Image (cartoon, coloured by chain):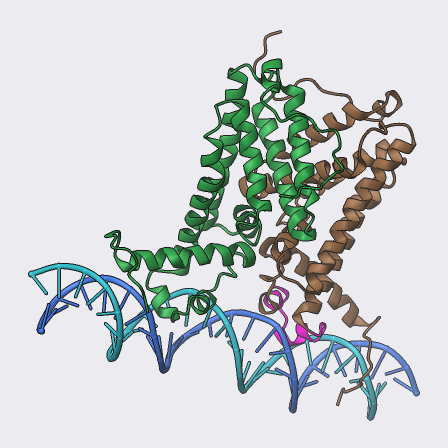
Chain colours: A brown, B green, C blue, D cyan
Amino acid sequence: MPRTGAAEPVKAKGGRTRQNILEVAVDIASAEGLEGLTIGRLATQLAMSKSGLFAHFGSKEDLQLATIDTARSRFISDVIRPAFEAEIGMARLWKLCERWLGHVQGGVCSGGCFFAAAASEFDSRPGQVRDRIAEIMNEWLGMLRKAIIESQQAGQISTDVDPIQLAFEFNSFELGANWAFQLYGDQQAFGRAREAILERLRRHATRSGATLLPPADKQRRRVRTKR
Amino acid sequence: MPRTGAAEPVKAKGGRTRQNILEVAVDIASAEGLEGLTIGRLATQLAMSKSGLFAHFGSKEDLQLATIDTARSRFISDVIRPAFEAEIGMARLWKLCERWLGHVQGGVCSGGCFFAAAASEFDSRPGQVRDRIAEIMNEWLGMLRKAIIESQQAGQISTDVDPIQLAFEFNSFELGANWAFQLYGDQQAFGRAREAILERLRRHATRSGATLLPPADKQRRRVRTKR
DNA sequence: CTAAAAAACGAACGTTCGTGCTATTACACA
DNA sequence: TGTGTAATAGCACGAACGTTCGTTTTTTAG
């Protein structure tokens, strides 16, 4: 009878298996959605039995929550951490946006931005899952806002700018690029988002802030303007 | 007890029923997604039998496609048609964006923008449903682009502007507002999107174009929209 | 008023879902 | 090496899914 009541499977082999499961779960969920992430499907893909897999999680909701947090870790190490290697202020702000776009474009998750997909799947479905997703996306928005404010404090962005408004716009461009890429495979959308963000940053940058942005390459999708 | 209503020899009764079903289907689907739109659930809500309802559609996919087209009709009469009452050019362009935001904010569909939700649900699920959604969203994007180009031809927007880029940005703001509203109930997001769009229109407007835009009220933080 | 046609029904099918049991295997430590 | 426990498998369940089928009710037409 393996009926030890208060057990916390921490270190042993099960921990590794659990992590394996979750890595695959993130991929499936980002493509098929968190509800389409089926225990049977996950088990098949991992060559495990449903019940053997299920034992690692008390319920489907637990599996979903664990999957979300795994996706969050991936996002942190793929976007946040590299951006934080850049210096505080404009450089970091720009790198945050750039890494986000690269994160989606690079196809780390086959279904585009995990959280954008999960958010729209659960936005009208109350519960822990929805709350966690909202929390994480709020972390991200907050990080954008903070980076904007820090850029202002460093004298690199005009203080006339409302950080909340600017963060909203940047986040929108990122959602828009993700949307166009997912629905149409439109790679150019990332370029458009990048351009939109950069244009915005340049417009509000102080002289010292502007030097931290990549040089403006004028040859964008120009429609044959004779010069 | 089906009442025959007025002496209007419109359609066979089945046609009316079908339309009834689809109206409810749009509501459910916009909240629960097109896959969450379950035949049993739909039947329950309509006090019909599953099989009786199902007979109106050959398959679930047919039901989904019909639901999509019903949502499209709703969108056309709620957004497109009113915008086309405005004069061609800047006025119409602005009204298109404004009506879109109002359409979502007004909660015509309880789940926010039907197509934004459907797109992210089906974007990695090939088939007729996905194709139809992509087609409709492309109609919308094309309409935005066309309105921008017409504004340029009317001399109301600078011809330096790339219509594709601007349409991408406007669409992104709309997606961003929808996202914030759905996930956080953030009503202010619509104001932010409105402001972002207007700011761009003003920046690129010619003198004659600027007169067609609403006056800039500087107190943007104010909400106080008692209707 | 009646008979054909259309619409709606009820029950059942085969799947798949999440989730419990119980039995079996693999591994850590003696 | 033996043993206890953690990890996994096998099996079964009830519910919900889309779908089919034969029947009954309602609407329409002559």
Considering depth in this image, is A182 or B88 the residue closer to the camera?
B88
Instruction: Judge whether residue A43 is colored magenta.
Output: yes
Q: Residue at x 48, y 41 (%)?
A: B78
* Residue C15 location (% of width, % of height): 46, 71
* Residue B101 location (% of width, % of height): 59, 40
Work out whether C14 lies above or below A82. below
Considering depth in this image, is A86 or B118 the residue closer to the camera?
B118
Asked whether residue A22 appears in the rendered view, the answer is no
Q: Residue at x 66, y 48 (%)?
A: B181
Asked whether residue B53 appears in the rendered view, the answer is yes
Considering depth in this image, is B3 or B67 the residue closer to the camera?
B3
Left or right of C5, for residue B68: right
Magenta residue span: A42-58
* Residue A131 location (% of width, % of height): 72, 60
Work out whether A50 lies above or below A182. below
- Snapshot quadrant of residue B223: top right
Left or right of B56, for residue B120: right
Instruction: Judge whether residue A176 is colored magenta.
Output: no
